[in-house]
Amino acid sequence: MAVPTNPYTSKDGSAFVQFSPGTEVYPIGSCWEAGDIPNPQPDSEPIQCFDEFRAYQTVGEKISPPGKITTTLTGLIESAVSWMETVKEAACPFSLFFTQSDCGRKNVFTNRERSYVLRNVRITDDPVSNVMMRDSDEESTHAFNVTAWPGRVDHRELTASSLTITGAPTAVVPDITACADRCAGECGPRIPLCENLIGGYLSVGAVAPDILLSRDRGATWTSPITTFPVSTGVVSNACIQVDKDTTRIVAVRNTDPAAAVGETQYSDDWGASWTSVAMGATASEGAIGGASMFFLDAEHGWICTDDGRVYFSSTGGTSWVDQTTALTASGAAVLNAIHFYDANIGVAVGAGNVLIQTADGGENWTTGTGPMAGDSLDAVHVFDSQRVIVGTDGASGTDGPLYMSYDGCVTWTEITEGLNPLVTDEVADVTFLPDGMTGFLVRNLSGATSGTVFKSIDGGWSWKSITTPTNTGLRSIYACNANLAFAAGSAAGPLSFVAQISG
């Protein structure tokens, strides 16, 4: 490790509050201090029994959950109400952000370099001190003792670097995803986070399309060949755990020029062999992009298509059922992206501001209200039954390309903080971690030759750009954790492009 050259001190810190995820963030002000901010981790307790010699032997362990986070914020008392008093009076859980930076004003949220986020915070006590004294004049203070859900989410300053794609053909990469990680144990050896990466490939010439595969987090790549028809492309992949011994790759292609019906393929041996599965019976049907397919788990997977249909799989991609009400709800418009919060609540979006939604896993789809007439909706993430974020292509030339709904897609709020959007920008993909706070998106500027990665730590209200290597358009983003993600698209000409975002 290098010797620190510019370590932070307490003067570099600040704190912010947020009433609910995805809404405005407020600096609590100057003259505040925070106590230690712990991050309790799961603990283990040995499982023991007597052996034949009546001696204790440890035969296993049981894991206890992490405890709540507790800390204290203390500020000066003045005549004006403080933000901490405001959140106390609201009597609802809130979020706390502690940030550090050595440049710029501390009360500007996007100036952060390091951040520590506490979710579902509640005030447990708020003692006031030094209200009056007999013979001493001391500052009066108001302390707020808080508890928060575990664990603390730590964010670092991130940079993006392009990965060298060797041993594979050159093509646009419209999708990037990763397979699950695990610790070493009875299920097998350790699999590091995002060790196994899978990308789609748009075909180059009249050849069968490949996928892009790395088993070492992007250090080296191979290109297993699917048996899709020639001149098609793999536009979206999913990696699902079928059982403890089987990791399955599911791939969906775009439209076949020969007018074949929609098709997926799956492989249980890392692309060495593939099994083809028809999605439906419609000629020339296919998927559009990296977010066209979404698997919640092996028993819940969906695909949206360029004919306005949605297909569902409860068999890990070995069969598909047409959810027929989607076609009526979409009006047969092109559907670009689909995402589900759980097994019931989902949204699909597409061309012409089309948005369809379901509350029963797709048994019934209904037409919703899109955020911007004239735009194609290219990206969607569903946080819960009420909060949804959508990215558009900005084709209407009216407003920016990112919108949030807090009422189940009835009304929409344009998101601009940190994006500095132009009205014809495109948000091609957006994704969030399960905490609902940490998100990444890829944006392509109108008229520019390069896309940019952005990150949010507050549920999508504000975004901070990450310097991104030169490319000719980004199509997909996959988040591994708060400080590791991968983006994909195209480099100069038809070259392959995958970038690692880390810090």
Image (cartoon, rainbow, N blue to C red):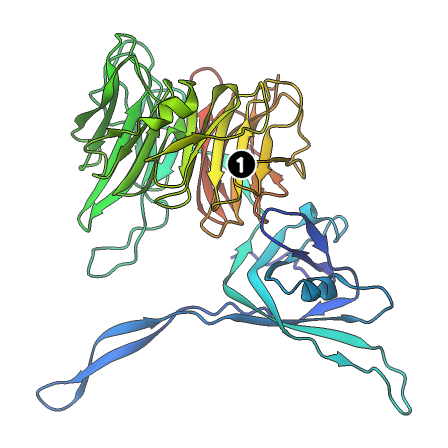
Position of residue 26 in the picture relative to residue 242 (left or right): right
- In the rendered view, tell whether residue 379 sits above or below residue 90: above
The residue shown at (59%, 49%) is 458
The residue shown at (49%, 40%) is 501
* Res 476 visible: yes
Q: Position of residue 168 (x, y in %)?
A: 31, 24
Q: Position of residue 276 (x, y in %)?
A: 18, 25
Q: Which residue is mark 1?
A: 409
Residue 304 or residue 246, whichever sits in front: 304
Secondary structure under tag 1 reads loop
Residue 242, quarter of the rendered image: top left
* Res 214 visible: no
The residue shown at (80%, 71%) is 76
Q: How many marks?
A: 1
Position of residue 350 in the picture relative to residue 9 (left or right): left
- In the rendered view, tell whether residue 220 sits above or below residue 277: below
- In the rendered view, tell whether residue 357 sits above or below residue 491: below
Residue 37 or residue 220, whichever sits in front: 37
- In the rendered view, tell whether residue 83 sits above or below residue 196: below
Position of residue 20 in the picture relative to residue 78 (left or right): left
Residue 491 or residue 332, whichever sits in front: 332
Amino acid type, label 1: Cys
Residue 307, quarter of the rendered image: top left
Residue 374, quarter of the rendered image: top right
Q: Position of residue 190 (x, y in %)?
A: 28, 55
Residue 36 or residue 369, whichever sits in front: 369
